[in-house]
């Protein structure tokens, strides 16, 4: 049993207490993050575990945390996000309409979410080991008006979709809906929900869209450093309930991330590597996908 003192230490908000801000980028790679004390490293990699003991209502983290790659898996996945002469990671192209989208054969993942949910920031930290990849991060809601395609060598493509909701571009529905409905190489959709506010009406519309098209998708809760522990927990329970009762092909585990503190980012890279078929997991992992 973890003592109260340790539980407090494991709270996401406290994760990097004492770590100077200028160090944040050093957490971008597993090797540098591994310099953290063991408990802080675990909380950085597996933020759901850091909530262990806080959940009530008859279920535990074991019910939720299904994707638990080994350190070796995380390290191998990370190599995919490190560019080399033979493995270029770069912005590829943009499109405002589906018929302008590049024809690509490799597996694709896309990131969707309400404007300001933290999508550009998350993509930027996912690619932080490839600093030449420029991801625009804006403080103005609705700045992403195009589908932006990024290639990760020949391994997969990542697509940054326009934000929806308040101030979404008018042609959002036409663009995103037709992308989700017709993109043949799309293997997983990452639907971002603000961890500080939980699922909003616009998110429910996006969930419905994924359900309607039978898309395998994953809910990622962003900005977990920003919310109070109680708020994060109640939003986590809300997300879990929506996944359980209102989704068809959603991965049962929500992923928790903070782009400012790199929390959950290493394991998210690993999940992307896995679902795009680039990382067979080693034996010491439990994964029970719905599809
Ligand atoms: P987008 O419109 O979904 O692409 O959102 P952005 O990535 O541009 O982020 C919107 C705002 O949220 C910006 O001011 C970011 O600095 C902030 N933000 C993004 N991610 C995080 C996070 O993990 N933690 C905190 N505290 N702020 C974040």
Image (spheres, rainbow, N blue to C red):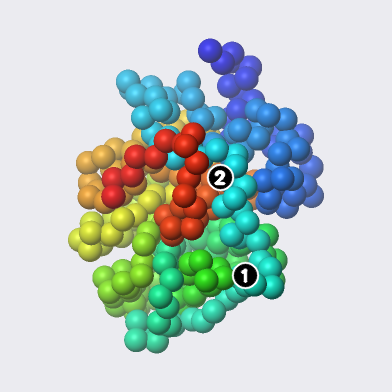
Total number of numbered discs in the rendering: 2
Is 274 placed left or right of 82 in the picture? Answer: left
Q: Give the residue displayed 39% in from the left and 40% down from the top.
A: 287
Q: Which type of secondary structure does the marked residue at label 1 adopt? A: loop
Is 253 placed left or right of 268 in the picture? Answer: left
Q: Percent position (x, y) of residue 96? A: 41, 83
Q: Percent position (x, y) of residue 281? A: 48, 45
> Vertically, is 152 above or below 74?
below
Q: Specify whether tag 1 is near ligand 1 (CB below 8 Å).
A: no
Q: Which residue is mark 1?
A: 87
The image quarter in which residue 36 lies: top right
Q: Percent position (x, y) of residue 109? A: 43, 63
Q: Give the residue displayed 68% in from the left and 51% down from the top.
A: 28
Q: Residue 73, which numbered label? A: 2
Outermost residue toward the bottom?
Answer: 100
Q: Which type of secondary structure does the marked residue at label 2 adopt? A: helix
**Mark 1 residue crowding within 10 angstroms, few (<14) / some (14–19) / many (20+):** some
Nearest the viewer among 225 and 44 is 44
> Vertically, is 164 above or below 265?
below
Nearest the viewer among 265 and 5 is 265
The image quarter in which residue 106 lies: bottom left
In terms of sequence position, does the residue under pointer 2 or pointer 1 come before the other? 2
């Amino acid at each position: 049993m973890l003592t109260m003192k340790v539980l407090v230490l494991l709270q996401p908000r406290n994760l990097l207490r004492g770590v100077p801000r200028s160090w944040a980028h050093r957490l971008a790679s597993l090797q540098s993050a591994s310099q953290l004390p063991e408990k802080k490293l675990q909380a950085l990699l597996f933020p759901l575990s850091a909530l262990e003991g806080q959940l009530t209502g008859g279920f535990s983290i074991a019910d939720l945390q299904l994707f638990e790659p080994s350190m070796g898996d995380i390290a191998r996945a990370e190599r995919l996000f490190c560019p080399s002469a033979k493995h270029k990671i770069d912005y590829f192209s943009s499109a405002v309409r589906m018929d302008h989208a590049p024809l690509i054969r490799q597996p694709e993942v896309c990131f969707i979410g309400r404007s300001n949910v933290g999508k550009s920031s998350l993509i930027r930290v996912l690619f932080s080991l490839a600093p030449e990849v420029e991801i625009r991060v804006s403080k103005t809601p609705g700045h992403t008006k195009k589908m932006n395609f990024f290639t990760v060598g020949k391994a997969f493509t990542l697509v940054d979709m326009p934000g929806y909701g308040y101030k979404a571009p008018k042609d959002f529905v036409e663009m995103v809906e037709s992308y989700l409905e017709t993109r043949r190489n799309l293997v997983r959709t990452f639907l971002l929900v603000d961890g500080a506010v939980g699922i909003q009406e616009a998110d429910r519309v996006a969930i419905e869209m994924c359900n309607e098209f039978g898309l395998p998708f994953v809910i990622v809760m962003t900005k977990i450093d920003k919310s109070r522990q109680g708020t994060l927990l109640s939003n986590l329970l809300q997300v879990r309930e929506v996944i359980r009762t209102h989704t068809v092909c959603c991965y049962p585990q929500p992923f928790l991330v903070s782009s400012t503190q790199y929390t959950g980012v290493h394991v998210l890279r690993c999940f992307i590597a896995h679902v795009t078929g680039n990382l067979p997991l080693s034996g010491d992992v439990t994964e029970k996908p719905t599809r």
